Image (tube, rainbow, N blue to C red):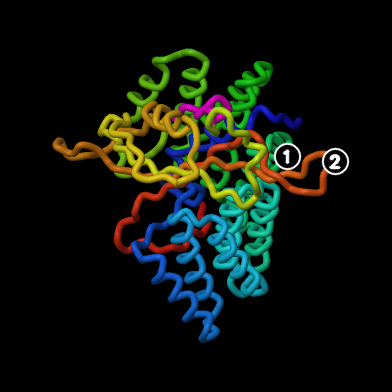
Amino acid sequence: MVTRQLPLLVSALLVLPALAHAQDSAHVQTVLVTGKALAETESQLKACLARNCPPREDIDASLAHAENQFIAGEYHAARSTLAAARGRNARYASQYPVEVADLIRAYGRLTDLDGYRNLSRLLQIESLDALKAGLDQGDSRVLMQRLMTGDEFARSGQIVAAINVYRKVAKQADKAKLPQVRGHAMFREAVLYGAVSEVRLAYRSTAEDAIRRIEKTTQPELGPFREAAGMLRASLASARGDKQAIDKAVASLGTKVNKPVLIYAPTVQVDQANVAPTGIGLASLGLDTGPQWIDVRFRIAADGTVHDVETLRQSDTVHGIWPKKVHEALAGRRYAPLRLAADDDGLARIERFTMVFDTHTPTGSRLRSLTLVGRLSSIDLTPEPAGSTPRDSNKGG
Protein backbone atom coordinates (compact mmCIF):
# COMPACT_ATOMS: atom_id res chain seq x y z
CA MET A 1 0.00 0.00 0.00
CA VAL A 2 1.36 3.40 -0.99
CA THR A 3 -0.55 6.56 -0.15
CA ARG A 4 0.36 10.18 -0.87
CA GLN A 5 -2.00 11.55 1.77
CA LEU A 6 0.05 10.39 4.71
CA PRO A 7 3.49 12.00 4.85
CA LEU A 8 2.45 15.16 6.73
CA LEU A 9 0.29 13.25 9.20
CA VAL A 10 2.92 10.57 9.68
CA SER A 11 5.53 13.26 10.23
CA ALA A 12 3.41 14.73 13.00
CA LEU A 13 2.61 11.43 14.66
CA LEU A 14 6.19 10.18 14.62
CA VAL A 15 6.98 12.58 17.46
CA LEU A 16 4.65 10.70 19.75
CA PRO A 17 7.03 8.08 21.18
CA ALA A 18 8.30 10.89 23.39
CA LEU A 19 7.77 9.16 26.72
CA ALA A 20 9.87 6.30 25.46
CA HIS A 21 12.37 8.71 23.93
CA ALA A 22 12.87 10.29 27.34
CA GLN A 23 15.19 7.33 27.90
CA ASP A 24 16.62 7.25 24.38
CA SER A 25 16.97 10.48 22.43
CA ALA A 26 18.70 8.98 19.41
CA HIS A 27 15.77 9.70 17.10
CA VAL A 28 14.92 13.22 18.16
CA GLN A 29 16.06 15.42 15.30
CA THR A 30 18.49 17.66 17.14
CA VAL A 31 21.42 19.87 16.24
CA LEU A 32 23.95 20.38 19.01
CA VAL A 33 24.46 24.13 19.44
CA THR A 34 28.13 24.43 20.42
CA GLY A 35 28.39 28.21 20.79
CA LYS A 36 31.42 28.39 18.47
CA ALA A 37 31.45 31.00 15.72
CA LEU A 38 31.08 29.93 12.11
CA ALA A 39 34.52 31.29 11.26
CA GLU A 40 36.02 29.31 14.14
CA THR A 41 34.60 25.95 13.07
CA GLU A 42 35.63 26.68 9.47
CA SER A 43 39.19 27.41 10.62
CA GLN A 44 39.28 24.29 12.77
CA LEU A 45 38.12 22.09 9.89
CA LYS A 46 40.68 23.60 7.50
CA ALA A 47 43.45 23.08 10.05
CA CYS A 48 42.34 19.51 10.60
CA LEU A 49 42.43 18.73 6.89
CA ALA A 50 45.76 20.51 6.41
CA ARG A 51 47.45 18.13 8.85
CA ASN A 52 45.64 15.07 7.49
CA CYS A 53 43.85 14.53 10.77
CA PRO A 54 42.53 11.06 11.69
CA PRO A 55 39.01 10.09 10.53
CA ARG A 56 37.38 10.66 13.92
CA GLU A 57 38.75 14.20 14.17
CA ASP A 58 37.80 14.90 10.56
CA ILE A 59 34.24 13.71 11.17
CA ASP A 60 33.82 15.71 14.38
CA ALA A 61 35.21 18.89 12.80
CA SER A 62 33.05 18.44 9.70
CA LEU A 63 29.90 17.86 11.73
CA ALA A 64 30.58 20.89 13.93
CA HIS A 65 31.13 23.18 10.94
CA ALA A 66 28.17 21.83 8.97
CA GLU A 67 25.90 22.33 11.97
CA ASN A 68 27.09 25.94 12.25
CA GLN A 69 26.47 26.45 8.54
CA PHE A 70 22.99 25.00 8.93
CA ILE A 71 22.20 27.27 11.88
CA ALA A 72 23.38 30.24 9.79
CA GLY A 73 20.92 29.20 7.08
CA GLU A 74 23.61 28.01 4.67
CA TYR A 75 21.89 24.73 3.83
CA HIS A 76 23.64 24.07 0.51
CA ALA A 77 27.06 24.77 2.03
CA ALA A 78 26.37 22.56 5.05
CA ARG A 79 25.37 19.72 2.79
CA SER A 80 28.52 20.20 0.70
CA THR A 81 30.66 20.09 3.85
CA LEU A 82 29.21 16.73 4.87
CA ALA A 83 29.30 15.37 1.32
CA ALA A 84 33.03 16.06 1.20
CA ALA A 85 33.53 14.48 4.64
CA ARG A 86 31.63 11.41 3.51
CA GLY A 87 33.88 11.14 0.46
CA ARG A 88 36.97 11.21 2.68
CA ASN A 89 35.76 8.91 5.45
CA ALA A 90 33.17 6.42 4.18
CA ARG A 91 35.92 3.86 3.56
CA TYR A 92 36.67 3.74 7.29
CA ALA A 93 33.28 2.28 8.22
CA SER A 94 34.69 -1.07 9.35
CA GLN A 95 37.12 0.69 11.71
CA TYR A 96 34.80 3.46 12.91
CA PRO A 97 31.25 2.24 12.23
CA VAL A 98 29.51 4.54 14.70
CA GLU A 99 31.36 7.69 13.67
CA VAL A 100 30.92 7.08 9.93
CA ALA A 101 27.25 6.19 10.43
CA ASP A 102 26.73 9.42 12.39
CA LEU A 103 28.31 11.40 9.56
CA ILE A 104 26.21 9.77 6.85
CA ARG A 105 23.03 10.07 8.94
CA ALA A 106 23.62 13.80 9.40
CA TYR A 107 24.38 14.16 5.69
CA GLY A 108 21.10 12.41 4.97
CA ARG A 109 19.16 14.80 7.19
CA LEU A 110 20.66 17.85 5.51
CA THR A 111 20.04 16.29 2.11
CA ASP A 112 16.39 15.89 3.04
CA LEU A 113 16.19 19.53 4.16
CA ASP A 114 17.83 20.56 0.89
CA GLY A 115 14.96 18.95 -1.03
CA TYR A 116 16.50 15.64 -2.09
CA ARG A 117 14.19 13.28 -0.25
CA ASN A 118 14.89 10.12 -2.26
CA LEU A 119 18.64 10.54 -1.86
CA SER A 120 18.13 11.16 1.84
CA ARG A 121 16.36 7.81 2.17
CA LEU A 122 19.27 6.07 0.44
CA LEU A 123 21.73 7.76 2.78
CA GLN A 124 19.89 6.43 5.83
CA ILE A 125 20.32 2.96 4.36
CA GLU A 126 24.00 3.74 3.76
CA SER A 127 24.29 4.77 7.42
CA LEU A 128 22.88 1.36 8.34
CA ASP A 129 25.44 -0.32 6.09
CA ALA A 130 28.22 1.62 7.83
CA LEU A 131 27.13 0.28 11.21
CA LYS A 132 26.84 -3.25 9.85
CA ALA A 133 30.40 -3.00 8.52
CA GLY A 134 31.82 -2.93 12.03
CA LEU A 135 29.11 -4.08 14.44
CA ASP A 136 27.23 -7.30 15.04
CA GLN A 137 23.91 -7.59 13.17
CA GLY A 138 22.09 -7.82 16.50
CA ASP A 139 23.72 -4.73 18.01
CA SER A 140 21.13 -2.26 19.28
CA ARG A 141 22.65 0.56 17.22
CA VAL A 142 22.25 -1.44 14.02
CA LEU A 143 18.63 -2.24 14.85
CA MET A 144 17.81 1.37 15.79
CA GLN A 145 19.26 2.63 12.52
CA ARG A 146 17.22 -0.01 10.69
CA LEU A 147 14.14 1.52 12.33
CA MET A 148 15.14 4.88 10.89
CA THR A 149 15.10 3.38 7.41
CA GLY A 150 11.57 2.27 8.20
CA ASP A 151 10.74 5.83 9.22
CA GLU A 152 11.90 7.02 5.81
CA PHE A 153 9.52 4.57 4.14
CA ALA A 154 6.72 5.84 6.39
CA ARG A 155 7.37 9.49 5.59
CA SER A 156 7.26 8.76 1.87
CA GLY A 157 3.95 6.91 2.22
CA GLN A 158 5.35 3.39 1.67
CA ILE A 159 3.36 1.92 4.53
CA VAL A 160 3.78 -1.80 3.89
CA ALA A 161 7.55 -1.43 3.55
CA ALA A 162 7.74 0.52 6.81
CA ILE A 163 5.59 -1.98 8.72
CA ASN A 164 7.73 -4.85 7.44
CA VAL A 165 10.86 -3.11 8.74
CA TYR A 166 9.31 -2.42 12.15
CA ARG A 167 8.09 -6.00 12.58
CA LYS A 168 11.40 -7.49 11.51
CA VAL A 169 13.30 -5.32 13.99
CA ALA A 170 10.83 -6.17 16.77
CA LYS A 171 11.52 -9.88 16.23
CA GLN A 172 15.28 -9.36 16.05
CA ALA A 173 15.25 -7.25 19.21
CA ASP A 174 13.17 -9.84 21.05
CA LYS A 175 15.62 -12.56 20.04
CA ALA A 176 18.59 -10.40 21.09
CA LYS A 177 16.92 -9.55 24.42
CA LEU A 178 16.78 -5.82 23.67
CA PRO A 179 13.37 -4.83 25.10
CA GLN A 180 13.71 -1.08 24.53
CA VAL A 181 14.55 -1.57 20.86
CA ARG A 182 11.56 -3.91 20.60
CA GLY A 183 9.44 -1.21 22.23
CA HIS A 184 10.54 1.39 19.69
CA ALA A 185 9.67 -0.98 16.85
CA MET A 186 6.25 -1.88 18.27
CA PHE A 187 5.42 1.73 18.97
CA ARG A 188 6.35 2.84 15.48
CA GLU A 189 3.96 0.28 14.05
CA ALA A 190 1.16 1.59 16.29
CA VAL A 191 1.91 5.20 15.36
CA LEU A 192 1.96 4.45 11.66
CA TYR A 193 -1.29 2.49 11.71
CA GLY A 194 -2.80 5.33 13.74
CA ALA A 195 -1.80 7.76 11.01
CA VAL A 196 -3.23 5.51 8.31
CA SER A 197 -6.49 5.17 10.25
CA GLU A 198 -7.02 8.94 10.04
CA VAL A 199 -7.40 8.76 6.27
CA ARG A 200 -8.60 5.16 5.95
CA LEU A 201 -11.18 4.38 8.62
CA ALA A 202 -10.91 0.63 7.99
CA TYR A 203 -7.51 0.71 9.71
CA ARG A 204 -8.81 1.97 13.05
CA SER A 205 -9.14 -1.55 14.46
CA THR A 206 -5.64 -2.37 13.21
CA ALA A 207 -4.28 0.69 15.00
CA GLU A 208 -6.13 -0.26 18.19
CA ASP A 209 -4.72 -3.78 18.00
CA ALA A 210 -1.19 -2.43 17.68
CA ILE A 211 -1.71 -0.17 20.70
CA ARG A 212 -3.16 -3.02 22.75
CA ARG A 213 -0.18 -5.25 21.97
CA ILE A 214 2.06 -2.68 23.62
CA GLU A 215 -0.27 -2.20 26.59
CA LYS A 216 -0.31 -5.96 27.20
CA THR A 217 3.47 -6.21 27.56
CA THR A 218 4.78 -6.82 31.07
CA GLN A 219 8.53 -6.19 30.92
CA PRO A 220 9.58 -3.29 33.19
CA GLU A 221 11.78 -1.89 30.40
CA LEU A 222 8.66 -1.41 28.26
CA GLY A 223 6.89 0.70 30.90
CA PRO A 224 7.59 4.01 29.07
CA PHE A 225 6.18 2.51 25.88
CA ARG A 226 2.99 1.44 27.65
CA GLU A 227 2.56 5.03 28.85
CA ALA A 228 3.34 6.30 25.36
CA ALA A 229 0.73 3.92 23.92
CA GLY A 230 -1.86 5.52 26.19
CA MET A 231 -0.80 8.95 24.95
CA LEU A 232 -1.09 7.75 21.36
CA ARG A 233 -4.60 6.49 22.00
CA ALA A 234 -5.51 9.88 23.48
CA SER A 235 -3.92 11.76 20.59
CA LEU A 236 -5.90 9.76 18.05
CA ALA A 237 -9.08 10.33 20.04
CA SER A 238 -8.35 14.07 20.13
CA ALA A 239 -7.82 14.14 16.37
CA ARG A 240 -11.22 12.49 16.00
CA GLY A 241 -12.99 15.16 18.03
CA ASP A 242 -12.56 14.20 21.70
CA LYS A 243 -11.14 17.49 23.01
CA GLN A 244 -10.80 16.17 26.57
CA ALA A 245 -8.76 13.10 25.65
CA ILE A 246 -5.33 14.74 25.89
CA ASP A 247 -6.11 16.47 29.20
CA LYS A 248 -7.28 13.18 30.71
CA ALA A 249 -4.26 11.29 29.43
CA VAL A 250 -1.78 13.88 30.71
CA ALA A 251 -3.52 13.91 34.09
CA SER A 252 -3.10 10.14 34.29
CA LEU A 253 0.70 10.36 34.15
CA GLY A 254 2.06 9.42 37.53
CA THR A 255 5.27 11.45 37.62
CA LYS A 256 6.65 14.74 36.36
CA VAL A 257 9.75 14.81 34.16
CA ASN A 258 12.88 16.94 34.09
CA LYS A 259 13.22 17.16 30.31
CA PRO A 260 10.61 18.16 27.71
CA VAL A 261 8.59 15.15 26.58
CA LEU A 262 6.25 15.92 23.70
CA ILE A 263 2.85 14.25 24.03
CA TYR A 264 0.69 15.91 21.39
CA ALA A 265 1.51 18.11 18.40
CA PRO A 266 -1.21 19.53 16.14
CA THR A 267 -0.45 19.13 12.45
CA VAL A 268 0.60 22.28 10.62
CA GLN A 269 -1.59 22.48 7.53
CA VAL A 270 1.12 23.58 5.11
CA ASP A 271 -1.01 22.84 2.06
CA GLN A 272 -3.32 25.68 3.13
CA ALA A 273 -0.66 28.04 4.44
CA ASN A 274 0.03 30.09 1.28
CA VAL A 275 3.76 29.53 1.29
CA ALA A 276 4.24 32.07 -1.50
CA PRO A 277 2.71 35.55 -1.71
CA THR A 278 -0.26 36.09 -3.99
CA GLY A 279 0.75 36.41 -7.62
CA ILE A 280 4.12 34.68 -7.28
CA GLY A 281 4.26 31.21 -8.77
CA LEU A 282 6.32 28.57 -6.99
CA ALA A 283 7.15 27.07 -10.37
CA SER A 284 9.50 30.01 -10.89
CA LEU A 285 11.66 28.93 -7.95
CA GLY A 286 14.98 27.51 -9.13
CA LEU A 287 17.09 24.74 -7.59
CA ASP A 288 19.43 27.37 -6.13
CA THR A 289 16.62 29.19 -4.33
CA GLY A 290 17.54 29.73 -0.70
CA PRO A 291 15.60 27.81 1.96
CA GLN A 292 12.64 29.25 3.84
CA TRP A 293 13.19 28.85 7.57
CA ILE A 294 12.26 30.37 10.92
CA ASP A 295 13.72 29.90 14.39
CA VAL A 296 10.96 29.89 16.99
CA ARG A 297 11.33 30.15 20.75
CA PHE A 298 8.60 29.04 23.14
CA ARG A 299 8.19 28.11 26.79
CA ILE A 300 6.76 24.95 28.30
CA ALA A 301 4.84 25.51 31.53
CA ALA A 302 4.84 23.10 34.47
CA ASP A 303 1.52 21.65 33.31
CA GLY A 304 2.93 20.90 29.85
CA THR A 305 1.15 23.68 27.97
CA VAL A 306 3.03 26.06 25.66
CA HIS A 307 3.16 29.86 25.85
CA ASP A 308 5.25 32.85 24.72
CA VAL A 309 5.69 31.62 21.15
CA GLU A 310 7.86 34.03 19.13
CA THR A 311 10.01 34.01 16.01
CA LEU A 312 13.60 34.90 16.88
CA ARG A 313 14.86 35.17 13.31
CA GLN A 314 14.04 33.99 9.82
CA SER A 315 15.49 33.73 6.34
CA ASP A 316 14.99 36.54 3.86
CA THR A 317 13.18 34.07 1.60
CA VAL A 318 10.20 33.40 3.89
CA HIS A 319 6.89 33.95 2.08
CA GLY A 320 3.25 33.73 3.07
CA ILE A 321 1.55 32.82 6.32
CA TRP A 322 3.07 29.43 7.08
CA PRO A 323 5.07 30.88 10.03
CA LYS A 324 1.74 31.93 11.56
CA LYS A 325 0.48 28.37 11.12
CA VAL A 326 3.58 27.11 12.92
CA HIS A 327 2.95 29.47 15.85
CA GLU A 328 -0.65 28.27 16.11
CA ALA A 329 0.42 24.63 16.09
CA LEU A 330 3.13 25.21 18.71
CA ALA A 331 0.62 26.90 21.00
CA GLY A 332 -1.50 23.75 20.80
CA ARG A 333 1.26 21.33 21.79
CA ARG A 334 1.11 19.39 25.03
CA TYR A 335 4.14 18.11 26.89
CA ALA A 336 4.35 15.85 29.91
CA PRO A 337 4.14 17.85 33.17
CA LEU A 338 7.53 19.29 34.11
CA ARG A 339 9.26 19.38 37.46
CA LEU A 340 9.81 23.16 37.77
CA ALA A 341 10.27 25.61 40.63
CA ALA A 342 7.13 27.47 41.69
CA ASP A 343 8.46 30.79 40.34
CA ASP A 344 9.75 29.32 37.05
CA ASP A 345 7.92 30.79 34.04
CA GLY A 346 8.65 27.76 31.90
CA LEU A 347 11.34 25.81 30.11
CA ALA A 348 12.55 27.63 27.00
CA ARG A 349 12.98 25.72 23.74
CA ILE A 350 14.10 26.78 20.26
CA GLU A 351 13.13 24.97 17.07
CA ARG A 352 14.11 25.55 13.46
CA PHE A 353 11.20 25.10 11.03
CA THR A 354 12.06 24.73 7.36
CA MET A 355 9.67 24.79 4.42
CA VAL A 356 11.20 22.23 2.08
CA PHE A 357 10.44 22.14 -1.65
CA ASP A 358 11.54 18.78 -2.99
CA THR A 359 13.34 18.45 -6.30
CA HIS A 360 11.81 16.35 -9.06
CA THR A 361 12.02 15.80 -12.80
CA PRO A 362 8.72 16.72 -14.51
CA THR A 363 7.29 14.32 -17.06
CA GLY A 364 8.75 14.99 -20.49
CA SER A 365 11.65 17.03 -19.15
CA ARG A 366 15.28 16.29 -18.34
CA LEU A 367 15.63 19.31 -16.09
CA ARG A 368 15.03 19.05 -12.38
CA SER A 369 12.79 21.61 -10.70
CA LEU A 370 11.12 22.20 -7.35
CA THR A 371 7.73 20.83 -6.38
CA LEU A 372 4.85 23.31 -6.19
CA VAL A 373 3.87 22.35 -2.63
CA GLY A 374 6.28 22.49 0.28
CA ARG A 375 6.56 20.26 3.31
CA LEU A 376 7.50 21.34 6.81
CA SER A 377 10.41 19.95 8.79
CA SER A 378 11.59 20.91 12.28
CA ILE A 379 14.81 20.43 14.23
CA ASP A 380 15.54 21.25 17.85
CA LEU A 381 18.12 24.04 18.23
CA THR A 382 17.92 24.43 22.00
CA PRO A 383 21.47 24.89 23.36
CA GLU A 384 22.67 21.78 25.16
CA PRO A 385 23.93 21.91 28.76
CA ALA A 386 27.67 22.23 29.25
CA GLY A 387 29.44 18.90 28.89
CA SER A 388 27.24 17.54 26.09
CA THR A 389 29.04 15.82 23.23
CA PRO A 390 28.27 16.15 19.54
CA ARG A 391 28.06 12.41 18.94
CA ASP A 392 24.64 11.38 17.64
CA SER A 393 25.00 7.64 18.04
CA ASN A 394 22.04 5.32 18.01
CA LYS A 395 21.37 3.73 21.35
CA GLY A 396 18.99 1.17 22.65
CA GLY A 397 18.42 -1.75 24.96
Q: Residue at x 69, y 52 (%)?
A: 119
Q: Total label count?
A: 2
Label 1: few (<14), some (14–19) or many (≥20) C-alpha neighbours in 10 Å: some
Q: Residue at x 52, y 22 (%)?
A: 236
Q: Between tags 1 and 2, which lies in front? A: 2
Which amino acid type corresponds to the residue marked 2 in the rendered image?
Answer: Gly
In the depicted structure, whether residue 329 falls above or below residue 77: above
Q: Quadrant of residue 102?
A: bottom right
Which amino acid type corresponds to the residue marked 1 in the rendered image?
Answer: Ala
Report the front residue among 157 and 141. 157
Residue 161 got which mark?
1
Q: Is residue 254 visible?
A: no
Q: Estimate the x, y position of residue 250 in percent, counting from the top left.
A: 36, 26
Give the alpha-carbon distance from disc 1 to disc 2, as whole Å. 29 Å
Residue 267 part of the magenta-drawn span: yes
Q: Residue at x 67, y 73 (%)?
A: 91
The answer to whether 247 appears left or right of 18 in the picture is left
Q: Residue at x 37, y 45 (%)?
A: 313
Q: Which residues fall within the magenta stretch? A: 263-274
The answer to whether 122 appears left or right of 327 in the picture is right
Quickly name the residue at label 2: 364
Q: Estimate the x, y position of residue 391 in percent, counting from the top left.
A: 47, 63
Q: Estimate the x, y position of residue 237 in percent, counting from the top left.
A: 49, 18
Label 2: few (<14), some (14–19) or many (≥20) C-alpha neighbours in 10 Å: few
Q: Estimate the x, y position of residue 109 in percent, counting from the top left.
A: 57, 52
Residue furthest to the top: 241
Residue 298 part of the magenta-drawn span: no
The answer to whether 302 appears left or right of 213 in the picture is left
Report the front residue among 113 and 394. 113
Q: Quadrant of residue 133?
A: bottom right
The answer to whether 125 appears left or right of 78 in the picture is right
